[in-house]
Amino acid sequence: MPQPACTRFLRWALPRLGKRWTGFRPVQQQVCRCLVDRLTTLDLRSFDAYRDYLREHPDEWETVDACSRITISRFYRGAPVFDRLRADELPRLMARAHGTLRCWSAGAASGEEAYTLVLLWHQAVQPGDGTQRLRILATDAQTHMLGRAATAVYEGGSLKELPAPLVRLAFDRAAGPDGLCYSLKPRFRAPVQLALHDVRTPPPTQPFHLICCRYVLMYFDAEVRRHCLAHLTDRLLPGGVLVLGTRDLEPPPDLPLLPINRALRLYRRE
């Protein structure tokens, strides 16, 4: 299937899902592979035929939406952000948390971000006081990604940015179907609860000290993005921290968020 045909289809379809074509331009190959597979399943010969199919079968838009979910996830992705969390924000938040630090990793994919937070907490906070606890809610809209997070077995490429001492601390080596894999030890999985959730839908009811929603909102249009940011901010406790992706746009100025570090997209709830 020629790539220009998929590009034209995406430019037509994404705005109908509240998504921005400009956000998808660098990753369109990933989306197109999924869509081409879908056309093959439906025995359709072109994206024009798929447009006609969507008009006749509106439920199929759910499949287009699922194909346009980007899942690029690694441990310690964006090292300066995690360095700042380890050195400053996690200890500060823990001091305000009265024993239990509650975090939400929204759009958690296969769990690398949530488990990175666990490792940082063990490194920066827990050694000082065994009474302090961590609870992380890791959510994603894709069941198969949550399944991978539950298994917590990763290929070496997922750990390439994680400092070597943390790899040695937290992982056991295991043989996988495609070579050497790394299995996260049970004690580092324990603080994480996995749940199915789409960031566009009403958020969890509990408040959080820290919310990470990185490289998720960049794919949505302004209206959807603002709606999601309002929900995320509402779930932050006063003084809590919101972490966005460094390619995400800044939050609108009317939300009660103060920049901690604009370059790293770190914000504090008023």
Image (tube, rainbow, N blue to C red):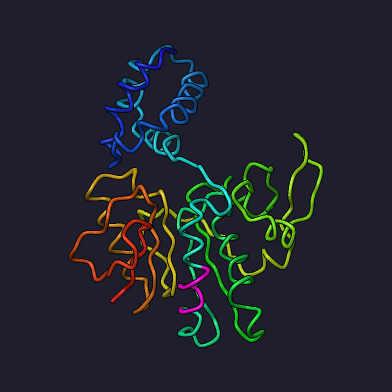
Residue at 51 percent of width and 80 percent of height: 94
Q: Is residue 130 left or right of residue 52?
A: right
Give the vertical position of 1 relative to 184 (above or below): above
87 inside magenta stretch: yes
Q: Nearer the viewer, residue 266 or 53?
A: 266
Residue at 68 percent of width and 43 percent of height: 156
270 inside magenta stretch: no
| Residue 132, position as x, y percentages in the image | 60, 83
Q: Is residue 151 left or right of residue 27?
A: right
Work out which quarter of the rendered image holds the C terminus and state it. bottom left
Magenta stretch prevailing secondary structure: helix
Q: Nearer the viewer, residue 76 or 200?
A: 76
| Residue 265, position as x, y percentages in the image | 35, 58
Residue at 52 percent of width and 65 percent of height: 137
Q: Is residue 267 left or right of residue 103?
A: left
Q: Residue furthest right?
A: 175
Count of numbered tags = 0
Q: Nearer the viewer, residue 245 or 141?
A: 245
| Residue 155, position as x, y percentages in the image | 68, 42
Q: What stretch of residues is rendered in magenta? A: 86-92
Residue at 64 percent of width and 86 percent of height: 131
| Residue 246, position as x, y percentages in the image | 38, 51
